[in-house]
Image: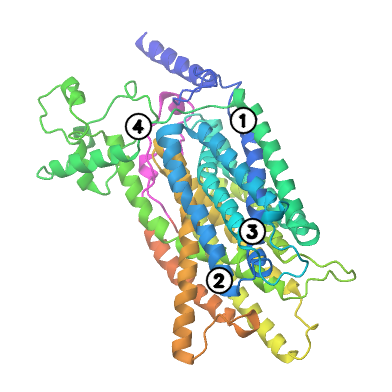
Amino acid sequence: MEHNKVDTELQDSYDDQQKWVLDSSTDSRGKIPLRSRTGAWRAALFIIAIEFSERLSYFGIATNLVVYLTTILHQDLKMAVKNANYWSGVTTLMPLLGGFVADAYLGRYATVLLATTVYLMGLILLTLSWFIPGLKACHEEICVEPRKAHEIAFFIAIYLISIATGGHKPSLESFGADQFEDGHSEERKMKMSYFNWWTAGLCSGILTAVTAIVYIEDRIGWGVAGIVLTIVMATSFCIFLVGKPFYRYRAPSGSPLTPILQVFVAAISKRHLPCPNDSSLLHELTKEEYTKGRLLSSTKNLKFLDKAAAIEDRENDNTKNEKQSPWKLATVTKVEEVKLLINMIPIWFFTLAFGVCATQSTTLFIKQAIIMDRHIIGTKFIVPPASMFSLVALSIIITVTIYERVLVPLLRRATRNERGISILQRIGTGMVFSLFAMIIAALIEKKRLDYAMEHHMSKTMTLSAIWLAPQFIVLGIADAFTLVGLQEYFYDQVPGSMRSLGIAFYLSVLGAASFANNLLITISDHLAEEISGKGWFGKDLNTSRLDRFYWMLAALTAANICFFVIVAMRYTYKSVQPSLAVVADGGDDVETAVTNNTSKFT
């Protein structure tokens, strides 16, 4: 009878999980979401739609920014690249603030609404700077120096977009991932696919930006392009609002910094205690008491922090332990969340080199395309230089599709891993491709310089831009592995209350890499001038030595890959305690198996 009762309870729990979403999320009315009517792909498609328009707007500006700065604002190459990198760096670091606000105070949905409003303000100002007479760059067709008012309006507009991206990017992507429940086996597999199709959606926006929008900017006018971007963003915003009844929402959980500090304070205050070897001696809530996510299992790394969950007086009953201040006694789950964040630091650091390589596709690669022959053979059509970035977008879309439809099923059968390969293996694979991209870029740039030297008397004889295709394509393949892997890694491995910040951590890799790229340009240029009397970055590309800069990046990337592999082999993944429903469904939770929680990077 007791056995039948247990089976009935398990079946009831399983049935409840199939009908209701039991991960602390709510529907638009604040009630427990019904699985058949909310979330999953029916909600995610609305979210991917607004991401398409956001990437359309961002890359419509970003890929042509160096061109704008050098042709409209008349900045030299070094200053233009630095300004582009500063803007890119701020744009990708701002999500740290936006993600914090979303997780702690506003919630992800409200943050997306606020950020999109600010985004539209930036686009409107950018558009007006080309139509209001007092804000126009010049009144004459031939412009020697742009008006200061236009320059100020332009930078205010793009930095409004930068601030908006800080709230929009981490909140929207994590809000989309929130539509899939980790504890449900089918939705968990959908979430793994979500990051791939999210990337395919945003790359579609990028592809449209670097073809249609860039063409409008170059051939029709920047003001017309601004009108198009504003209309598309406003339309997608309305579509996003239409999806409100289908979304699953998570309430903000307060400052994520407080639990982290509590663990450190509790561990330091009990530093005199021996480290418990038995996890049963550590304090933890029951699954019924813990309502804000999933309980984590204790791991063996960073054992000192386990003292925060150590119970000093074993004679006290559980009720007294639970009443202790969280500054004196933390739960195992809170301790493990802090360990996860500490373990992320070396992963974040050793992906910076990849970020520096990725930065080249929107700066120096585009500048190379400007001075090369971009005619389509047999026609008079000239491809806009920023449209070369479409090769990266196409490469990402094709690679992600092949990875999702072909490689993952094959790898799942070979490795018996739900993801096919581990997240860090995917990230590392992309790093190898970025190394190849820098080597190719160095070889092609040397060929271009030699060609320019041979035909220096002829201004019409330039090397075809088709020679740049391999470095764009290979870097796109690298992005498909590493950038998608980083998105999944930082969303999956952060505490559940920090999911927006997790996406912000991923974006901060690219932001910090932009600043690191500026630093490398300055240092390498100065050292080259000190050693040989001539820097690597001249007034134009024909007086520069980008090939040597690319070789330096290749060497740094190769060394970085070695360190990344060492860190990845020692990495311990999040270990989640399985729920009854998951166990009843087979117990094959990608995060739960404690025995498989250590990365095997080989």
First to last magenta residue range: 572-600
Quadrant where the N terminus lies? top left
Task: Check residue 79 in the rendering and tell me which mark sits there, or answer none.
Answer: 2
Of residues 433 and 444, which is closer to you in this image?
A: 444
For the residues carrying marks 4 and 2, which lies nearer the camera in this image? 2
Residue 464 in percent (x, y) is at 76, 76
Pointers 3 and 4 in contact (CB under 8 A)? no
Residue 70 in percent (x, y) is at 65, 69
The residue pinned by badge 4 equals 295
Q: Judging from the image, what secondary structure is the residue with disc 4 in?
A: loop
For the residues carrying marks 3 and 4, which lies nearer the camera in this image? 3
- Among the two numbered marks 1 and 4 on one chain, the one whose residue lies closer to the N terminus: 1
The residue pinned by badge 1 equals 43
Pointers 4 and 2 in contact (CB under 8 A)? no
* Mark 2 nearby-residue class (10 Å; few <14, some 14–19, many ≥20): some
Residue 579 lies in the magenta stretch = yes
The residue pinned by badge 3 equals 150
Q: Is residue 426 left or right of residue 389?
A: left
Q: Is residue 571 visible?
A: no
